[in-house]
Image (spheres, rainbow, N blue to C red):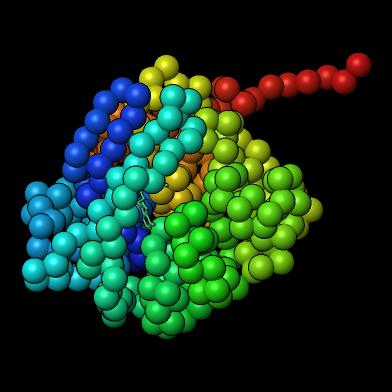
Amino acid sequence: MTSNKLLIIGTMAYDGLETPFGKADRILGGAAVYGALAASQFNINCGIVSVIGNDFEESDLQVLRSRGIDLEGVEAVENGKTFFWKGKYHNDLNTRTTIETQLNVLETFNPVVPHNFQKADIVLLANLDPSVQLKTLEQIGSQPKLVILDTMNFWIENTPEVLFKVMGLTDVISINDEEARQLTEEYSLVKAAKKIHQMGPRYVIIKKGEHGALLFHEKNVFCIPALPLEDVFDPTGAGDSFAGGFAGYLTQTGNISFEQMKIAMIYGSALASFTVEKFGTENLIAVSKEELAQRIETFKNLTQFEIELI
Ligand code: AMP
């Protein structure tokens, strides 16, 4: 095992999902779960800081352990109930409504970063209460190479002040177009990215669902499409898989240049494309290194062209 360390802080959850193609009452989910599963495709040392209740299935923990994910930083609360989220997707699958958010054990969670991860190379603050993200960051000993932040409308609406504090300590933010507009009150994503830069993050990633993603840094903009897929079954966890793949790739290479971030975005996007093809974490768990490599190749062919100006 390599010593390149990625620490992921985020929810471990059970989700209730409704899409035009089916329904699930309670399946494994959570931002840290999707993120770590995606990151486990890389040759890195990946650990999670999170909290679960005693209703969390041992078999689900085993799935994560079997991928080499370190769970020392996961607190199990006796007589507690795991975070639960229920969402419903609309017909275009690009928009969804949150029906229920039960914070449960998250409400009183005090994160503890295991000694082994206090010098993580990269920290991914996956979707979670910003005050928990902040408490975790405070325990990171030396300055990590990169702090990456993902958040959600729930926290933008409910805890904006703490969220702004976390943004001030963040190098890269990864959010979707709707959240970027909500955060900045700007319709233009270029203007929104500029405003977000001023809030802290030097790199701003704006995800646009099936329309791909943009990376803004200083005067540079990079854009990738999403892979056109025949079957999109359940978009849950696409953003987290993207962030996990992005962070996992950069942790493995150890190089955090803008050029490497472009490639990291391709990996993130490829992993997200697997997630959405089946319900919950099913496909992300099953994907092999060869299948991932093939998908990266497809991506390359999709976006490469030569042009001679006339
Ligand atoms: P995504 O589709 O990438 O935005 O992430 C979906 C995952 O985020 C689900 O598995 C949920 O368990 C989790 N989630 C939903 N709401 C929240 C929230 N307010 N904070 C943290 N995680 C959440």
**Residue furthest front as drawn:** 99
Is 129 located above or below residue 13 in the figure?
below
Taking the spot 44% from the left edge, 24% from the top edge, the residue there is 91
Coordinates of residue 87 in the picture (x, y in percent): 34, 42
Location of the C terminus (image quadrant): top right
Taking the spot 30% from the left edge, 29% from the top edge, the residue there is 278
Coordinates of residue 188 in the picture (x, y in percent): 74, 45
Specify whether 157 is left or right of 290: right
Specify whether 292 is left or right of 61: right
Specify whether 27 is left or right of 238: left
Taking the spot 16% from the left edge, 62% from the top edge, the residue there is 81
Quadrant in which residue 173 is drawn: bottom right
Is 105 located above or below residue 257 in the figure?
below
| Residue 109 appears in the rendering | yes
Looking at this view, is 296 or 31 the one in front? 31
Taking the spot 47% from the left edge, 55% from the top edge, the residue there is 152
Looking at this view, is 237 or 223 the one in front? 237
Coordinates of residue 38 in the picture (x, y in percent): 35, 46
